[in-house]
Structures are given as structure tokens and as C-alpha cells.
Amino acid sequence: MFLAIDAGNSNVVFALFDPKNGKWTNQFRLETQTPKLISQLGKKVPLYFLEHGISPTEISHIGFSSVVPEINGVITQFCEGFFGLAPYLISPDSYKKLPVKPVRPNEIGSDLMCNVMAAYSRVKGPVIVVDFGTALTFTTVDEKGKIMGVSIVPGLHTAIKALFMNTSKLPEVELKLPESVLGKNTIHAIQSGVLYGYTGLVKGMLESIQKETGTKFTILATGGLSSILTNLQDDFDQVDRNLTLDGLRLITEANQ
């Protein structure tokens, strides 16, 4: 089986892909915070494999995408010790063999490259990937696979947390789309402002990108929070929470 490790700012996702059925069969996540991560790697990963009856020897390849460079050594060392395999770390050199081409390979995050690799391989035409993560990103690719540009704004959870941390009376609230845009209490008011506000933001960004480029794009959404804004479902052609993992696998395979 193929093991994908996707290290983001909030979580490190481990996912297993079974080539026999072409599906992601198992998935779990650990907190990215370094002191906790070292402990979790040594305890939770072996326990997960044991509980699910999966032997480390069943892993034949490991692909590793990371936007948190300070944990790369820890992850690599763990993989070598537990699986007996060195993970393939996606880097700017990895993009030379891909059908998607960034303008500045050293600046674009490997997570965004995984997104567009999977999306462009699937659509084979102009596509926008909206990734609802710690940051909310819009990555636009033309019909030839060239990345036209990226737009980045704080993610949903980041926005909620910023309100909580920078105001003395506003609480941290659940990410849940309320029935009404008109807040009836403090919690409802924050949910309404952030979630309906982000709905308008996403719609506006997609409209602006397509208007400026004069192009009709296929629009794919991904990320752990992609299912929160249910009122955006009609704006997306596909919602796939495994899009980043698919791209991680494809980039690794292209380079091995």
C-alpha cells in the first residue's frame, strides 16, 4: 500500500491508498505542534496500525508533503524507523516532471501543488481549486496546466480564532452555518458574520477570477472545512476531501 503523509499547519494527515481497489482505505491525523507530535508519532501511529490489523511491512511507498519544514526531520526519522522506508519529500524539483507548471516553484506550497496536480489530471482543462484549510486558498490553472495565480485569505477556523483571541468578550464558537444571516445572540452573530461572509467571499473570488481571465473554469473544493459552507455546494463542480492526497500520490509516482 501507498502511505501519504500531508503535514499542514494544524494537522499531519496519514492516509493509506490500496492500489488493488484504487481507494483511500484508512486515514487519521495528529496535531502538528512539534512537542506533541514526537510523542504522538511513537505512540499513536503504531497503535493505529495494530488496532486496524495493518503491518508496517504492507507499506511499499511513502509520499510526504509538508508546509512545516521544522517537522520534516522528525517525520522522516520516524518513517525510517517504523516502516523501514525513507519517505519521498515533495520539493520544487518534484515539479519538473508534472503536467502542471508553477511560475515560481520555490514559493508555492507543496499542498497547493498536490491539489492542482490531482485536479488538472482529473479535469484536463482550466480549473480552480478552492482549499478550505488553515488558510483558504484559490489556485487557478489554465488549459495548458500553467498555474496562473494563487489567492490566499485566512481560513474559517483562523478567522473565528482571531476574533476570540483579539477581543475580550467574544467567545470561540462552533463552525456551524446558522439558519439565518441575522444574528440573534453573540454566538449566532459570529457564526453568521464569518460563515455567510465567507460564502460571499468565495462567490466573489470565483466570479472575479473568471471575469478577469475570460475563462470558464471547472471548480473543485477540498480541505477539511469544505463541507461547512453547505450553501456553496452548487458553486462547485466537485467536492473532494481527498484531492490533496490524490495529488500527493500522483506527484510521488511521477518522481519514482
Image (cartoon, rainbow, N blue to C red):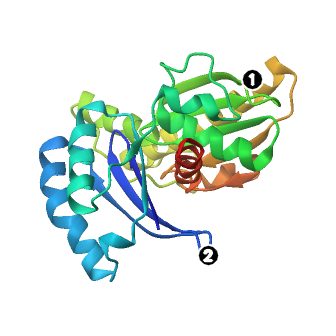
Residue 159 higher or lower than 252, as above or below = above
Q: Please state which amino acid type lies under the numbered disc 2.
A: Asn
Label 1 sits on a secondary structure element that is helix
Q: Position of residue 47 (x, y in %)?
A: 21, 73
Q: Amino acid at mark 1?
A: Ser
Which percent across, then down, holds residue 106? Answer: 48, 19
> Tag 2's secondary structure?
loop
Q: Position of residue 194 (x, y in %)?
A: 49, 39
Residue 233 visible: yes
Question: Quick check: 176 left or right of 115?
Answer: left
Query: Which residue position is annotated with label 1?
Result: 208
Tell whether 36 sits left or right of 93. left
Residue with the mark numbered 2: 21
User: In the picture provided, is 229 more to the left or to the right than 15?
Assistant: right
Q: Look at 80% across and 17% down and name the residue there.
A: 212
Q: Is residue 50 above or below residue 98?
A: below
Q: Is residue 252 above or below residue 98?
A: below
The mark closer to the camera, 1 or 2, is 2
Q: Position of residue 120 (x, y in %)?
A: 72, 41
